[in-house]
Amino acid sequence: MSAVTTTTTAVAVADAGELPRVRRRRRLSPGRRLPAARLAGPLVLLALWAAASAAGQLDPGAIPAPWTVVRTGVRLWTDGTLPTDILTSLERAAYGFAIGLTAGVVLALASGLSRAGEALIDGTVQLNRAIPTLGLIPLFILWLGIGETFKIAIIAIVVYIPIYLNTHAALSGIDSRYVELAEVQGLSRFAFIRQIVIPGALPGFFVGLRLGVTGSWLGLVVLEQINATSGLGYLMFQAQNYGQSDVILVGLLIYGVFGLVSDSAVRLIERRVLSWRRTLNS
């Protein structure tokens, strides 16, 4: 009887002395943001390009080495060709982007906040989206001439479509309970737009803005090869005629830098404006 009691007491003490195992929680988030993380991919591609060129794996006539492209860019900058072409391209892109941004936001608000506006606008925009924008170039040349106006108009169309689509989708996705709450609180139309509509539409608007910024550069590279006398696209088109692949790569790299910088700027503004959100990317 004593032995049984002793054994039972020992087991109880052993059980009482064991600490419960704490299950380690698995982290599912991407982790902390790395500094300058988006430059890692381009830098890796640049390193591979340089290594392949140094090893003689690339035809210098088709794909010049990075140092050759840099020397060509310095030469074009020194003789004044590159600064003029860059300023011309930036001006065209800025005008077209400003018009497209304004049109996209105004049309999205008119369509997203009114059934009558949606009936008149949304179907028309969807039809426009289905038509290849660059296929409108011959028609716009007939309407607006072959000067600068038609180039800016095409860029504006390329920009406004993604801004409209994403902003309109964000407006349509606003929870109807917020609308009912605004009605119960007796908010005015202006207060409703400022406190409910704008915060709800901003995430979609910034997605459309990023697509619109990229679209402005994509449209520009094509448009500047049509009856242009300056601009990066014109520079590349002339280089094609003379087989200057290094000049073409200079233009492409500048377009790529413009696209990366503008997208990063929009991302930075988005993080500042939407700092109240707690998302996976925060």
Image: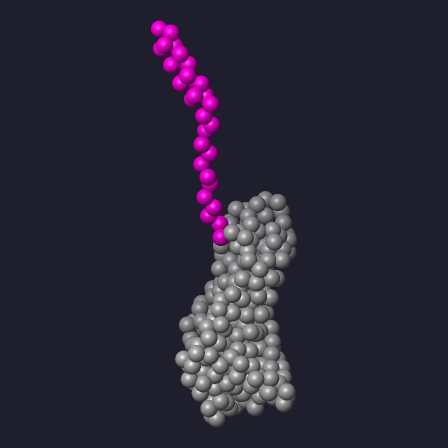
Let me know if residue 269 appears in the view.
yes
Give the colour scheme of this rendering. Answer: one colour
Q: What is the total number of numbered labels drawn onto the structure image?
A: 0
Seen at 59% across and 58% down, the residue is: 271
Asked if the stretch drawn in magenta spans residue 29, the answer is: yes
- State which quarter of the image contains the N terminus: top left
In percent of width and height, residue 21 lies at 45, 32
Nearer to me, 59 or 211: 59
Residue stretch in magenta? 1-30
In percent of width and height, residue 13 lies at 44, 18
Seen at 49% across and 89% down, the residue is: 244
Q: Place residue 259 in its image quadrant.
A: bottom right
Nearer to me, 99 or 211: 211
Nearer to me, 217 or 108: 217
- Judge left or right: residue 102 versus residue 168: right
Q: Is residue 117 above or below residue 177?
A: below
Residue at the bottom extreme of this rendering: 242
Q: Is residue 258 above or below residue 139?
A: above
Q: Is residue 68 above or below residue 114?
A: below
In percent of width and height, residue 265 lies at 60, 66
Residue at the front extreme of this rendering: 3
Asked if the stretch drawn in magenta spans residue 113, the answer is: no
Seen at 64% across and 87% down, the residue is: 78
Let me know if residue 148 appears in the view.
no
Seen at 52% across and 60% down, the residue is: 204
